[in-house]
Image (cartoon, rainbow, N blue to C red):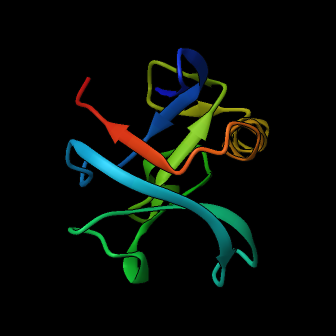
């Protein structure tokens, strides 16, 4: 799950390669998706190969990145992923979020 402060933003789905810790976050142009998307990075994942937050429904869509959605079904499928991504982008901009803490569930 993804929060902005104490405000719940959305559910997340990722392939499990993201370690607990502090990450910087910035919005920049994704060459692959040809749109502005959040990029998270730290010493382990430098910005040059950081992890994107993007829309998608299943782990098959993640390509090693973090997917977001408004709900998560029991078969690990995200719902309303594009709407959730819009909310995440707005929250990053509105709250001027530049750092993210990842903690195991």
Out of 42 and 80, give the one closest to the viewer.
Answer: 42
The picture places residue 104, in percent across and down from the top left corner, at 23, 30
Q: 73 or 14: which is nearer to us?
A: 14
Q: Which residue is drawn at 53% across and 51% down?
A: 98
**66 and 98: which is toward the camera:** 98
Residue 10, by quadrant, is: top right
How far from the left and from the top, in percent, is residue 87? 75, 36
Q: Could you tell me which residue is drawn at 58 percent across and 33 percent down?
A: 78
Name the residue rendered at 74%, 33% in the picture: 80
Which residue shows up at 42% across the image and 43% down it?
100
28 sits left or right of 59 in the view = right
Check the image and report above or below for 10 versus 42.
above
Q: How many numbered badges does the structure rendering display?
A: 0
In the picture, the quarter occupied by the C terminus is top left
Residue 76 position, x and y percent, is 44, 31
Q: Position of residue 50 (x, y in %)?
A: 40, 70
């Amino acid at each position: 799950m993804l929060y902005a402060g104490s405000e719940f933003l959305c559910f997340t789905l990722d392939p499990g390669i993201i370690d607990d810790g502090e990450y910087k976050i910035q919005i920049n142009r994704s060459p692959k998706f040809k749109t502005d998307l959040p990029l998270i990075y730290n010493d382990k994942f430098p910005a040059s190969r950081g992890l994107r937050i993007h829309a998608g429904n299943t782990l098959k869509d993640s390509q090693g990145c973090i997917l977001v959605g408004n709900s998560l079904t029991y078969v690990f499928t995200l719902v309303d992923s594009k709407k959730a991504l819009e909310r995440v982008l707005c929250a990053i901009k509105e709250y001027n979020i530049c750092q993210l803490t990842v903690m195991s569930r």
